Image (cartoon, rainbow, N blue to C red):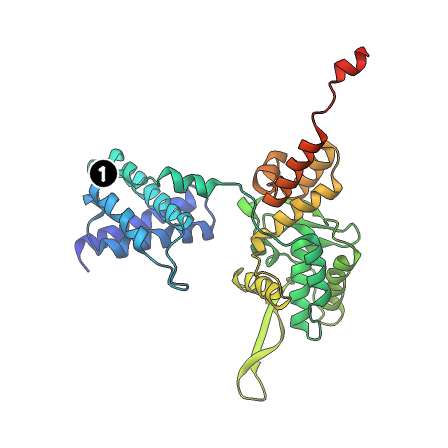
Amino acid sequence: MSKHTSNNLRIKRKNLVWLKDAKGLSQSSIDKAAASIAIYDRWLKGKDYRAFHSERARAFKRHLQGLRNERTGAPLSAATINAVLRDVMKLFDWMADQPGYKSRISRADIAYLTPDRKSEQARRSTMWKPHPSPEQVNHLLSIMPSETVVQRRDRALIAFLFLTGSREGAAITVRLRHVDLAHKCVQFDGRSVDTKFGKSFTTSFFPFGDDVERILRDWITELRQDHLFSDTDPLFPKTRVAVGPSRRFQAVGIAREPWAGPSSAARIFKQAFVDAGLPPFSPHRVRDTIAELAKLHCRTPEDYKAWSQNMGHNDVMTTFSSYGSVSPGRQVELMGRYRRRGPLPDEDAVIDE
């Protein structure tokens, strides 16, 4: 190993420790930063971090434009490129204050890693995103198979995500004790549930209907009565795999351990929609569906505030700005209605009359 490579590894490791212990980032955020830096390292080919300059930054940006997704073969999206550039910028910005580096790395040169404004604006866009309608959700859950315990778990997982607006990473860390069926709510305890930023809050079931709630209720009853699960066991245990009659590994039931990560839950979610003849929606779109459902139930500012809090948002504007976009078709429909209706009457003029 060259001296440059060992120095790079040492300062990179120090930075990751700083992200965890000084900045308090979650392990998933640290892993994403490490993955971005690894892309830079592969391109750098062992050259010294301290030899960073503006031309190197510009060359790395051109390199990212030419990279392709290893799985799909498609060019990297603007969001992915921006995320990599931001992570690498943060690394060098931190190094610019470290002994042995601050005299060699200029923040003026670091600025050359800044993503272009057009792609950055696209990343921050809050435009409407395709998502399942409440009717599609109910249809999906009504036709999902439920013959095996794994199928019933998968169906209950999807019902839970829509009833609570939970992210899949949080859902797989929920324990039975967190669910209060009597009051139809879930306590997302940030100390033990993998919530965003470790936040704790209570979510009452969103109004998707009794049939959806029954799916979750029946699943919890099965876990407690048939599988003898206790309060400390996971609500969504991982699949138990063993050698089957054909001498091949196959799913034979459920274990008592939770999934190690959210990828399996995300895959189950997408595949369920595909099997139902619907688009492969991502679980990230669950909250868009819930925001659409709000339009059917919320009438007053208090209604919207309660709905927003139930999604775990402190500010109702977070709900509107992130998930409240109107679909293009609905936008055109509303504007046509406004043109036909004309302006609303002036209240002062009505009073004068």
The residue most toward the bottom is 246
* Most foreground residue, 174 or 269: 269
Residue type (three-letter) at the residue carrying disc 1:
Ile
* Most foreground residue, 197 or 75: 75
Residue 228 lies, in percent from the top left, at: 72, 69
Residue labelled with disc 1? 105
Q: Residue at x 23, y 38 (%)?
A: 105
Name the side, left or right, on which 193 lies relative to 107. right
Residue 269 lies, in percent from the top left, at: 59, 62
Residue 98 lies, in percent from the top left, at: 27, 39
Q: Residue at x 66, y 37 (%)?
A: 336
Residue 145 lies, in percent from the top left, at: 69, 71
Name the side, left or right, on which 9 lies relative to 329. left
Can residue 189 be seen from the camera position used here? no
As helix, strand or loop, the secondary structure at mark 1 comes to loop
Count how many numbered circles sit on residues in the image: 1
Name the side, left or right, on which 30 lies relative to 223. left
* Most foreground residue, 90 or 287: 287
